[in-house]
Amino acid sequence: MTALRPLPGRSRSLRCSSEKMEGSGSWDVLEWSKLDSASLSSSYSNLDCLLESERIHFEACGVILINTNEAGTLLLSNFRIMFLSEGTRKLVPLGTIPFLAIEKFNKLALKVQSNKYHNDENAPNRLLQVTGKDMRIVVYGFRPGTKQRRAVVDALLRSNKPERVWDLYAFTCGPSKFGNANPKERLLNEYFRLLGKSSQQASMNMIEDGSFTVSNELWRITNLNSNYDLCQSYPFALMVPKSISDEDLIQASTFRARCRLPVISWCHPGSGAVIARSSQPLVGLMMNIRSSCDEKLVASFCTQLAGHKGARRKLYIVDARPKKNALANGAMGGGSESSSNYFKSEIVFLGIDNIHTMRESFSRLREYLDMHGTTSSDGTSSFLRHGASTWGGGNLSSMSASVSLLGDSNWLSHIQSILAGVAWIAARVAMESASVLVHCSDGWDRTTQLTSLACLLLDPYYRTFSGFQALVEKDWLAFGHPFSDRVGMPNVSESGNFELPIQSSSARSFPSSPVQQLSGSAIAQSSSSSYGPNNYSPIFLQWLDCVSQLMRMYPSAFEFSPTFLVDFMDCLLSCRFGNFLCNSEKERQQCGISETCGCLWAYLADLRSSSATSHVHCNPLYDPSRYDGPLLPPAAALAPTLWPQFHLRWACPVEPNATETEDQCRAMAVKYSEMKKEKEEAERKVDELSSAVESLSEELVTERDISRVARESAKRATKECAVISRAVQSLGCKVKFTKNGDCTVEVEDGPQKCSHSFPQKPSEDNTTDVSESISSVTEQNVCEALCPLRTREGMCRRPDAGCAQIGSQFLGLKTNFEAFEKLSIQEGYFAAE
């Protein structure tokens, strides 16, 4: 957006003198300053609230937010109006609104001062009323003599009226970190899922070479509209019956308004039933014009019923309009089908009003909420508006009349009509396995509302974050809902002719807003609107309202929360991202939206990624296992109420806090999740400890077995030693065993006593075996090994001794020992006597 320059003659700072402001209380320091963009951008560059590439162009100090009687600073950036509180210097949400979320703004002047400022000659009697597309009506007050309001209005006109779509903030900011993958790929992936070909993944190469024309036994994807030659408001890829050729599709398109021929929006994976969409047929005033190709195409939706040999399913043709409106369209060449011309068909009219009726209904609802809210745009409570201490001035009839104004807006009646039609369509598909063709006049407003809501009821996938994105991109964006016209944005076709038509507030037939009802104290000087009077309509907002009603009826069926819908709608109205710019897929491709603008879906996903399931966008009550099939609300449940998170957040800011229960539930869910993780961690540690205990137990059992065997071996060795000792002693020798296991043999030879020790030979397992020690000795020459008279040098001390006698004794010992070694000694042998 081009930087805005200060107005001529207003470059200096205007300040009210202290004498003039003396005695004015909190109004004594008011200043209007309007500097060049560079100095303002640098002075406010440290504001945390500034978005990427957002720059401050204008500043107005001492402005009053009349709604809350709060003084502060009004800033105009290249993206929005910002109101900073005088005390905290923080953004006030009510006074902060993006330019493209403004529906209109009026300059108002108070003829008679209200009691609040009756004694203040410098009271803010120069008012600027800003009406938002998000249900808010904001009034800013400016001091007389400062000409603040004139400068703000001039700047607002420049900022709120971009000449081209490329001047929008979404293009100035660029894709940033919220990159936008090509939506064509996502559309093809959704088609693949519906056809049961989820294993295939779309790519740009597939789109460029046209190889995405896959099919199943009933339906196929055609690239007939890849260059938007067949229908400029349809997507590049269409899902059609497999039995219909491209030539028949071309002929059928000429029989439908704006060439929006019947195509498939959703197909049931099991029964084969479909929800198809189109525009009205061009049957003419006499309803006698026919098209064989169109009839053949519509009849192809009546495929064979599964399990019914040869039986064909029924087709319902749902006309969303009132019947009289459909007949009236015949005068302009349109009209509706005749059931006699279409195979096994039944025509149903739902009676949903057109975009103009919805626009008026929305305006009435907004003014009703502003008039009867907690604090209205005139800063007066609805309880005190009539000058008494009770609501309605204590007059019960006044109270009843005020409440009846909500019904006069007919907003809830329109919501109920849409919900009733959607419930009927979903029941026909789910319970009868019937196919349904939906259309209105052009097939991009009421048709889109009905088909997308029916898909939401029938397919649980669309009730998740990823599925909701796929549903919106398929039925709303790809099939050409004109967002630029309906939301009030510049588009490609306008190309510099984006005007803000002046509207007179006196033309309203509904009671005006509170600022204009101060007993004639306010007059509207001018009014500017950001939309063409014949195109703007809150169709998508109405659809989100219907979604919120379904979420209220089925609180556990949706992965996302009502807060997600509110933030989603705010992002759409602000035009901060490029997803919903322009009127069709073709126009977005011409502008290069996906390459040059940020992606709303990526932004919302980034918000959720920091908190996972504990984020305010996540529904803490979501239970996919409970609602894994279609939702078929009964007629008695279709009683809509105001959507508090959206409708009441400005006029009745306390009421949306009724979601505190949801917040507590979410906090409990977070705590439960944390406790569950702690439990899993504790269980893991218990498993580890259990494994360690089992391992130690096994080792202990092994050690016990080894110890038992060792004790048994030691006991047996002790008994064997005792037996051998007695046997050796019977030969006249004494055998002694030391503590270290050595054996000493003493042989008595007359008066002399000789001894000889035998070192113990360790076994392989480091245990002592007496039998091995003795046997090793007996293997040697007895005289040489055991003779106590033999010296170390091998000489005999007494050659004349009776060595023969001693040798024979040891030979006998050896023989006895060999006999003992071969003898198996049982433990019972050593039993005590």
Image (cartoon, grey):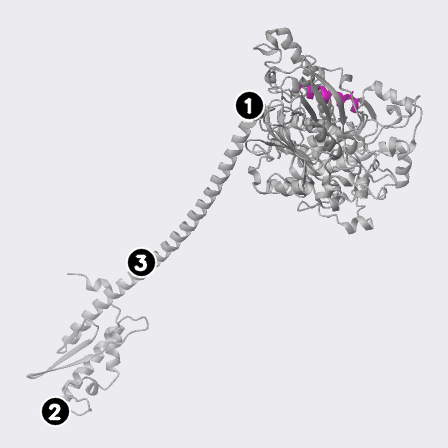
- Viewer-proximal residue among 189 and 72: 72
What element does badge 1 sit on? helix
Q: In this view, does 711 lie to the left or right of 517?
A: left
Residue interval drawn in magenta: 349-368
Q: Mark 2 points at which residue?
A: 798
Q: Mark 1 vs mark 3: which is more N-terminal?
A: 1
Instruction: Tell me the kind of residue under disc 3.
Output: Arg
* Residue 196 visible: no
Say which mark, if any, is on residue 736: none
Q: Is residue 791 left or right of residue 628?
A: left
* Res. 149 image quadrant: top right
What element does badge 3 sit on? helix
Say which mark, if any, is on residue 704: 3
* Res. 515 image quadrant: top right
What element does badge 2 sit on? loop
Q: Distance between the residues labelled 2 and 3?
A: 55 Å
Q: Mark 1 vs mark 2: which is more N-terminal?
A: 1
Q: How far apart are marks 1 and 2 (CA)?
A: 139 Å
Q: In this view, does 774 lie to the left or right of 789?
A: right
Label 3 near label 1: C-beta < 8 Å? no
- Give the x, y percent position of residue 68: 59, 24
Q: In this view, does 523 lie above or below 463?
A: above
Label 3 near label 2: C-beta < 8 Å? no
- Give the x, y percent position of residue 200: 73, 48
Q: Mark 1 points at which residue?
A: 25
Q: Is residue 356 above or below residue 205?
A: above
Q: Mark 2 vs mark 3: which is more N-terminal?
A: 3
- Main secondary structure type of the part rendered in magenta: helix
Q: How far apart are marks 1 and 3 (CA)?
A: 94 Å
Q: Does the magenta stretch include residue 21?
A: no
